[in-house]
Image (spheres, rainbow, N blue to C red):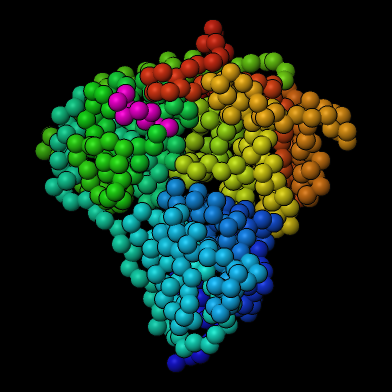
Amino acid sequence: MPKMKAAMAAVLVMEKEGITQAFGVPGAAINPLYAQLKERGSIAHVLARHVEAATHMAEGYTRAVAGNIGVALGTSGPAGTDMLTGLYSASADSIPILCITGQAPRARMHKEDFQAVDIASIARPVTKMATTVLEPAQVPRVFQQAFHLMRSGRPGPVLIDLPFDVQMAEIEFDIDTYEPLPVYKPAATRKQVEKALAMMMQSDKPLIVAGGGIINADASELLVAFAELVGVPVIPTLMGWGAIADDHPLMVGMCGLQTAHRYGNASMLASDFVLGIGNRWANRHTGSPEVYCKGRRFVHVDIEPTQIGRIFTPELGIVSDAKAALKLFLDVARQWKQDARLRDFSAWARECQARKRNLTFLRKTHYDSVPLKPQRVYQCMNNAFDRDTCYVSTIGLSQIAGGQFLHVFKPRHWINAGQAGPLGWTLPAALGVRVADPKRKIVALSGDYDFQFLIEELAVGAQFKLPYIHIVVNNSYLGLIRQSQRGFAMDYCVQLAFENVNSPEVNGYGMDHVKVAEGLGCKAIRVHGQHEIAPAIRQAEAWMEQYRVPVVIEVILERVTNIAMGTEIDNVTEFEDLAADKSDAPTALALLD
């Protein structure tokens, strides 16, 4: 039996499981693993500037391409605690990433040794498994179990903590006999699908709610095929955005309190039956169940049994992987079409399409004021970026407005930290997406505060030649929190502006993002008016081609803009006046043609 260090066995197992890329920050306690990575040379590595950022890079890497699993590496102590935000974000959105930490030698772990912390216990609530490996011979099997768990059932992250002496120990292990464990995915039965389809056929105004589980299962094509066959309109959740193209006739908008379309909410309220697939009825999609559920029947399909009935009780619950369920829905629907058992929902679909066409114009974007209103920025982005554009964003008014105004046409082209929404996520996640797909057109979208949280990671993009465009909409405010503070009649501790003694040209806005980006090895442009946006994007594309670095486009916004949101899907406050003319019509109509 071949002998090797336990750390080498870990590397060999990762290779067999398909890992070719890692992100991380080396340190004394994890150096034995790094030594084996260097010796093998089979797994590429991107050096992050912050360990939290490494986890977000791993998330972006996983989310960008079906089948990917991002790996983040760190040393002992604070490296592990820095990883917690990424683990939480991945867990919340059902994203598999593997975090590996170094640890003090086993004999020192309970003696308050330098940087020795029980990271497995700390990480357990936000992982599918978190464990400290205490026996060297168990290393390969713990890694095997980690990959099995990350891929099986509801996907999610794992943390493996490796004491220094465990990594260094010699073990017997034959990688040639190693095989990944079979992945477990529950599947719907034909009887369940027939019942669900019968309920749909009994309705007059059915909808399909398409969740992020459809993206995770790589089942978008099946969703579209099924929706087209039965003629039922689709409402994607924020995590499912892109599963059906925005300009598809059956895509009738997103529903929710924030990242939603007026026509999506209106169609949901007009419906009488909802088939949810791969979604979790998140509160920012539903609002209160009392409003969301009133007058309609529900079928819920989800891979995780405990999701069924967690928010409200559906009439029928089906535990199934989204791809397995959609394959069966498609098979049954095809048979029913041959037997003339499918109803004609074309009148209902036309009603939803008309609602989409008419209500599109009611959120005004065509403003010419300077400083810019964010609505105009998104209109300019729609005009400048094509259908292949992949947007990366996390949270804040910038992301909420992006959800209301931007357009997504392909799965995995809206990369978003949906439930956790950690500030700082956007920049490293965009770098992870770039590593996963060197050719994709990537546009990250941040408010100024999100951008500042992990701004140092721009240097990673410069060092490793990871070009993308980062649009920073700068109002020098914690805009979403300021808007929330309206309910408390205050504007307190949310202003980021100060007089910058080194950059008088940004006085009133504080931080000079252009200088910082340039100091970190990237290129940057500042934009004040809407006519500057398209030329700035063209310049950014030229610089990316020439220098192969991230390019920041900072757009100076008016300080205060309230974005539409509400307390219920039937009670969304539209802060801006309705468009009095059809000045927005050319862009919107092009989308709907």
Q: Residue at x 75, y 29 (%)?
A: 497
Residue 5 percent location from the top left of the image: 55, 84
- The answer to which image quadrant residue 278 occupies is top left
- Using the image as rendered, state which of residue 61 and residue 584 is in the foreground: 61
Depth check: give the residue in front, 348 or 103.
103
Give the answer, above or below, for where 588 lies relative to 81.
above
Q: Nearer the viewer, residue 80 or 534?
A: 80
Q: Would residue 98 be seen by someone viewing this image from the given angle?
A: no
Q: Residue furthest front?
A: 111
Which residue is farthest bottom? 1
Horizontal side of 559 relative to 307 (left or right) equals right
Q: Is residue 518 left or right of residue 550?
A: right
454 in magenta? no
In this rendering, would 169 be left or right of 522?
Answer: left
Question: Which residue sits at x=19%, y=40%?
Answer: 316
Image location of residue 151, percent across then percent down? 39, 60
Residue at position x 40%, y 34% from top? 283
Judge whether residue 119 can be spotted in this image.
yes
Point out the stretch of residues depicted in magenta: 284-292
- Please state, as top left, top right, bottom left or bottom right, where the C terminus lies in the image: top left
At a point 66% along the width and 55% down the height, the residue shown is 50
Side of 52 where 280 appears, left or right = left
Give the image quarter of residue 240: top left
Measured as percent of width and height from the top left, residue 211 is found at 37, 41
**Figure quadrant of the N terminus:** bottom left
* Location of residue 179 with respect to 156 vertically, above or below: below
Q: Residue furthest top?
A: 580
